[in-house]
Amino acid sequence: MSLHHLSTPRLTIDRRRAEFADREFEDRFIRHFLPERNAQLKASFLFSAGFYVVFGLTDIATLGPTVTAWTMVALRVLVALAALCACAAIARHPDSAAVSIRATNTVLAVGLGVFPVLCWYQPAAMSWNLMSLALILMAVYVIFPNRFIYAVAIGVVTSAVFAAMLLIQGLLRMDDVVALVLMLVLGNALGYIAARRFNLAQREQFRSTMLLQELADRDPLTGCHNRRVLQRGLLDAELTRTRRYGSALSVILCDIDHFKQINDTYGHAAGDQVLSEFAGLLQSMVREAVDTVIRYGGEEFLIVLPETELAGAHALAERIRVAFANAATAAGDGSFISATASFGVAAVPAQHPWPPSNFEALVGAADDQLYVVKRGGRNGVRGTVVTAAPELRSGT
Ligand SMILES: Nc1nc2c(ncn2[C@@H]2O[C@H](COP(=O)(O)OP(=O)(O)OP(=O)(O)O)[C@@H](O)[C@H]2O)c(=O)[nH]1
């Protein structure tokens, strides 16, 4: 789950390609719909495999039980096998968008590569076969989920191959050839329009959903993320990464000191101003697109620092502490408000043998450190490495 601002360029849809201009965001979109897409693909593969094989009966009926007819049936079975292998690949790699797209293109390439061979040997049925192709083209564009540009490339190349075949065979009258080629053009044009509209509409809907989610995940006063991102599993996902790859992870819990006094002295609006300047300072001092600042409580913020050891997190907290203590917020009446903040740091070191299994343990450890700083006079930083057993924690 990525939590970084959805900037306008990331959300731009390249209307020519009918996908997001930003590759990473497009991948996110594809991953979002991958389970649905794979289910549709499997159903389409199985349906087309059955259909392809059943139509072998027409080969036998047209050509009789000849070697050519049986070769055609064998080719049809080959296509069905390719479709079954694609289903198996998708089932084995349900999380891989690349496998899903490769499986689609392989089945389409095998199926549409075999089809001209079948048609070549049944010249008498060419008109019917070309009409079937026009319908198959619609499936290529709208039934098999694929990247729009791949669907267009497959549709156009297949149609060109058939047009060339008609001309090379030279069995049909020129006016029939023109009518059939026009039908293929129409099939491609309708498929193109339908697929483009569908791909654009799906992306526009996804963009709206992401923007709404972004709004719901943000605190309106400070622009920081709110606690919903923790409920949605941000920190748990980071902990999973830590467990899987042995990478370090730190959190800083920080709280403005005597904030109630600021409110009482200067008023709630000035308090809000101090809060949003503190949040702005936090956001400006962390790594963009890597760290996450969350408004954890009223005047309490949680900073999540992936791949950061205790020393690095402690140093960052200290830099923020000094910067905030030296800053002043302009109150509405022309006076300036100075404030300090306290920081509790908790870190899971790289290759930790027992990283915590949930974020509460990590945040709880940072909270304990923050509490000690508050009790010790505030305006300070204290950190700990999180161990499996709370009693083994060591303060720094
Ligand atoms: N202006 C403003 N005040 C808030 C907001 N959210 C919480 N507060 C206030 O923040 C204050 C927090 O007070 P306390 O929890 O007593 O903590 P404190 O005064 O900062 O004292 P220490 O944390 O012990 O240093 C309360 O008065 C809340 O009303 C907010 O969004 N805006």
Image: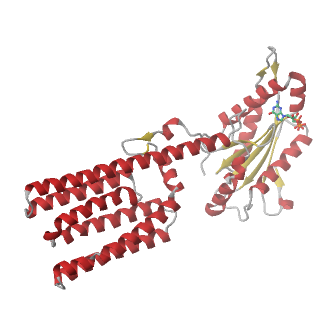
**Residue 49 pos. (x, y %):** 36, 73
**Side (left or right) of 74 relative to 384:** left
Q: Residue at x 30, y 58 (%)?
A: 137
**Residue 1 pos. (x, y %):** 60, 52
**Residue 385 pos. (x, y %):** 77, 54
The total number of labels drawn is 0
Q: Is residue 70 above or below residue 232?
A: below
Is the image coloured rainbow, by chain, by secondary structure, or in one colour?
Answer: secondary structure
Is residue 232 in view? yes
Residue 146 versus residue 395: which sits nearer the camera?
146
**Side (left or right) of 4 relative to 204:** right
Q: Is residue 182 above or below residue 56?
A: above
Q: Residue at x 37, y 71 (%)?
A: 83
Query: Which of the 4 image quarters holds residue 391?
Result: bottom right
Q: Residue at x 65, y 50 (%)?
A: 306
Q: Residue at x 73, y 35 (%)?
A: 320
Is residue 311 in view? no
Q: Quadrant of ligand 1?
A: top right
Query: Outermost residue toward the bottom?
Result: 65
**Residue 291 pos. (x, y %):** 65, 44
Query: Which of the 4 image quarters holds residue 242?
Result: bottom right
Query: Which of the 4 image quarters holds residue 377?
Result: top right
Query: Outermost residue toward the top?
Result: 334
